[in-house]
Image: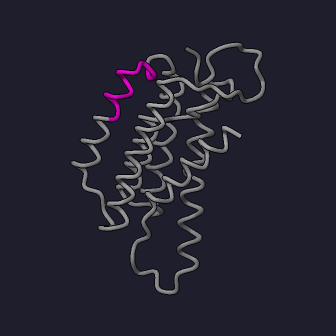
Amino acid sequence: MMSHGQGDSEEKSMSLVVSLPSVISFLTGLILLSGYSCMDLKHRKVPNRFIAGTATIGVVVVLLTGEILENWIVYLSATSCMLVISYLLFHIGAMGGADAKASLVVGLVSPGLMFGSLGSPVFEGVLISCLEILVMMGIGYGVYRCRENCEDTIPLIPALLIGYLSVQLLAML
């Protein structure tokens, strides 16, 4: 089963790759981000215990599919990239702790392109992580600019969900 850049090294364009493990990883990421988004919209916070518990379940599910072991370079590069970017954005106050943790969870359970391959697993992990964060921050900035009274925090996890879905679905075109 090939996925996430496994295969012919001469391949230069993106290819569509659909496998049961990639579908399970995608659905795991989608379900987790949807749950986090609902809590973020309703309460403006997502408890650490909830994130830790659901992330653990997500990682176990993905481990059982073999996806992490088969594509460990994508997982490592995406998770590392999400960790660094999320930490920096959290440190400067551009995102909250739950936003940073949710970003990291995406890197852990559903990194890179779930239904495609860019050829280089490191490039794929870093590029896709950056695009998802960029969409999240762009939507957050747009919402911030459109609101007249921005004293409340802006829920960014729903924007991360939109970024995640956009990148994954655009890759299938």
Q: Judge whether 152 appears above or below 167 on screen.
A: below
Q: Position of residue 26 (x, y in %)?
A: 48, 36
Whether residue 140 can be seen here: yes
Q: Position of residue 46 (x, y in %)?
A: 29, 57
Question: Residue placed at 55% from the left, 14% from the top?
Answer: 1
The residue segment tinted magenta is 58-68
Question: Residue placed at 25% from the left, 51% from the top?
Answer: 48
- Apparent side of residue 11 relative to residue 71 in the rendered image (left or right): right
Which quarter of the rendered picture does the C terminus lie within? top right
The quarter of the displayed image where residue 120 is located:
top right
The quarter of the displayed image where residue 135 is located:
bottom right
Q: Judge whether 75 appears above or below 137 on screen.
A: above
Q: Judge whether 113 appears above or below 99 on screen.
A: above
Question: Residue placed at 59% from the left, 16% from the top?
Answer: 2
Residue 32 belongs to magenta span: no
Q: Nearer the viewer, residue 145 or 30?
A: 30
Question: Residue placed at 35% from the left, 62% from the top?
Answer: 40
Q: Judge whether 170 appears above or below 150 on screen.
A: above
Whether residue 79 can be seen here: no
The quarter of the displayed image where residue 14 is located:
top right
Display colour scheme: one colour
